[in-house]
Amino acid sequence: MTKKIFMIGALLAALTFANTKANAQAVSGTVAVNLILSDAYSIVLGPTPDVTFTYATAADYSSSKNVLKSSHFTVVSNKPYSVAVKANSAFNTISTTTPPLSAVQISVDPSTITGATYTTATLTQANQTIAAAASPTIGTAYNINYAIPTAAPLLAMSAGTYTTNVVYTVTQP
């Protein structure tokens, strides 16, 4: 009988130890995660930025001319932004004739999706907004239309190549 009691006691002891749960302890620590944000924006020209209008025949002078530059430049901006355009200087002079900058119009093609309001700029040496309140972007490629609606301002000009540089500027409010 002592043997039976000893066996029952051993069995109860084994069940007690098997049923005991270990109480794990948790230790925690905090880590600060910082976001340091700056206003960031850029404009990068596409691989073929030059625009050329050729007037070689009488027919060329009788109609409007348009040049679409697809992916003309790409804008990155972490906030809403605007795009402006201007000429760096007047066209060069050949034999005392200089075409007016105002002969050229520049606009954002409607195929460019930015959420902005677009306007057509008549080229001058002052910044003119062509895209206002565009949505933030990590890379929007702009398709730009260059137009000479009428050749009238080009009449009586000396033959030759007239050049000016166009500057695009991105600004955040």
Image (spheres, grey):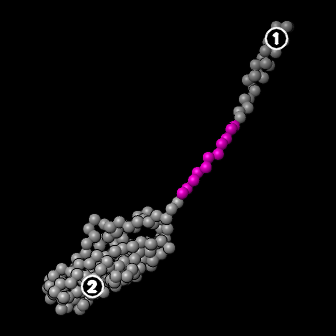
**Which amino acid type corresponds to the residue marked 1 in the rendered image?**
Phe
Q: CA distance from mark 2 to mark 1?
A: 110 Å
Which residues are drawn in magenta? 26-36
Location of residue 153 in the rendering, given as x and y in whole percent from the top left corner: 24, 90
Q: Is residue 165 left or right of residue 13?
A: left
The extreme right residue here reads 1
Image quadrant of residue 159? bottom left
Q: Is residue 35 magenta?
A: yes
**Which amino acid type corresponds to the residue marked 2 in the rendered image?**
Ile
Element on which disc 2 rests: strand
Give the mark count.
Answer: 2
Q: State if disc 1 and disc 2 touch (CB < 8 Å).
A: no
Q: Which mark is residue 6?
A: 1
Residue marked by disc 2: 148
Q: Does 42 sit above or below residue 155? A: above
- Upstream in sequence: badge 2 or badge 1: 1
Location of residue 131 in the rendering, given as x and y in whole percent from the top left corner: 42, 77
Quarter holding the N terminus is top right
Pick whichever, 8 or 173, lies toward us. 173
